[in-house]
Amino acid sequence: MTETKTVQVNRVYIKATPQAIWDAITKPEWTQKYGYSGLAEFDLKTGGKHRTKPTQEFIDAGFTSDLLDGEVLESDPPRKLVITWKLLMDPNLIAEPYTTLTYDIEETKTAGTRLTVTHDVTGAPGHAALVSGAMENVDAGPGENAGGGWAWVLSDLKSVLETGKNIVG
Amino acid sequence: MPGSPSPGTSRVPPNSLISTNTTPWREHGLTRDLLVTYSRRVPDDDLVFKALADPTRRGLLDRLFEHDGRTLTELESEVDMTRFGVMKHLKLLEEAGLVITRKEGREKLHFLNPVPIREIHDRWIDKYTERHVSALMELKSDLEREPPK
């Protein structure tokens, strides 16, 4: 990528209820099942904190501290969640400002539930590269992949909610 | 599991139920067949492939990949096409779920949504041929890097 995106928008249609999707975003029993995994912990009120703790796999790989954290700016379950968000796995990422992440969960009449993730990564080029999937290596083995960013995470989330199985090995 | 459909539900509706050229809901009146309705409303593989099967639309996606969140006027200035033509192509991309628009103030901004391409990747590439394809892609880029003799 030659230029940093300031806002990234990703959208997926999932055959699941808004509540199931809300839970998959905010509850550790779900967040460990897809994408980068990790155990989410949310204090779901305005000004509340959130963080994602490492799973045993991360701890075994040497990541013993929180993987990411931030603050809840708006919580309207199961429709809308706005949080600040920063990855803590790398000093370069820690040095960047907090990004802002908005989850919009909308029920449609015929197409299941529409989940739109809007990520404002202004001033955070490291985060922008990572969540856009620019650092993905498709030939990497399990546990070696930097992952495909939001498109990868949401595709995996859809698969977990619809089939009970994820794509990421 | 909460929110999950019955076992055996396919992620991809059978192709026979998706018609790109006809309008079954008009021909047969309002149908309660969920798959037919689904195929019309959800940006599915057919719409994505169709949207990608045009060099202008691929070009517009490339412009958005380079720099997201652009107005129609900005996009129009970069392609050799009328405003109406660009609008028409953007509408198809939007219907396929590849472009998402957001209002910011008085402006309508266009964003690239990579998720449908990711789903096609997971469905068609991961499953069968990922390693072969990437080996061929490497060969292609190696060969193309060679200076012409």
Image (tube, rainbow, N blue to C red):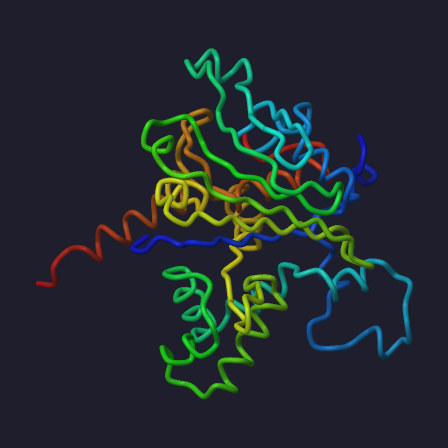
Locate residue A25, reporting x and y percent.
Answer: 65, 35
Seen from the viewer's position, the closer of residues A63 and A134 is A63
Residue at (76% x, 56% y) in the render: A111
Seen from the viewer's position, the closer of residues A161 and B107 is B107
Question: Looking at this rendering, what residue extends furthest in the front direction?
Answer: A47
Residue at (53% x, 54% y) in the render: A9
Locate residue A29, reporting x and y percent.
Answer: 69, 23
Q: Quadrant of the C terminus of chain A?
A: top right
Locate residue B45, reporting x and y percent.
Answer: 62, 59
Locate residue A98, reporting x and y percent.
Answer: 45, 38
Residue at (39% x, 67% y) in the render: B63
How many marks the image carries: the answer is: 0
Seen from the viewer's position, the closer of residues B73 and A30 is B73
- Location of residue A101 with respect to A53 vertically, above or below: below
Residue at (47% x, 54% y) in the render: A7
- Location of residue A124 with respect to A146 vertically, above or below: below
- Location of residue A128 with respect to B24 vertically, above or below: above
Seen from the viewer's position, the closer of residues B36 and A63 is A63
Q: Quadrant of residue B23?
A: bottom right
Q: In the displayed structure, does residue A69 sit left or right of residue A73?
A: left
Question: Looking at this rendering, what residue extends furthest in the top direction?
Answer: A60
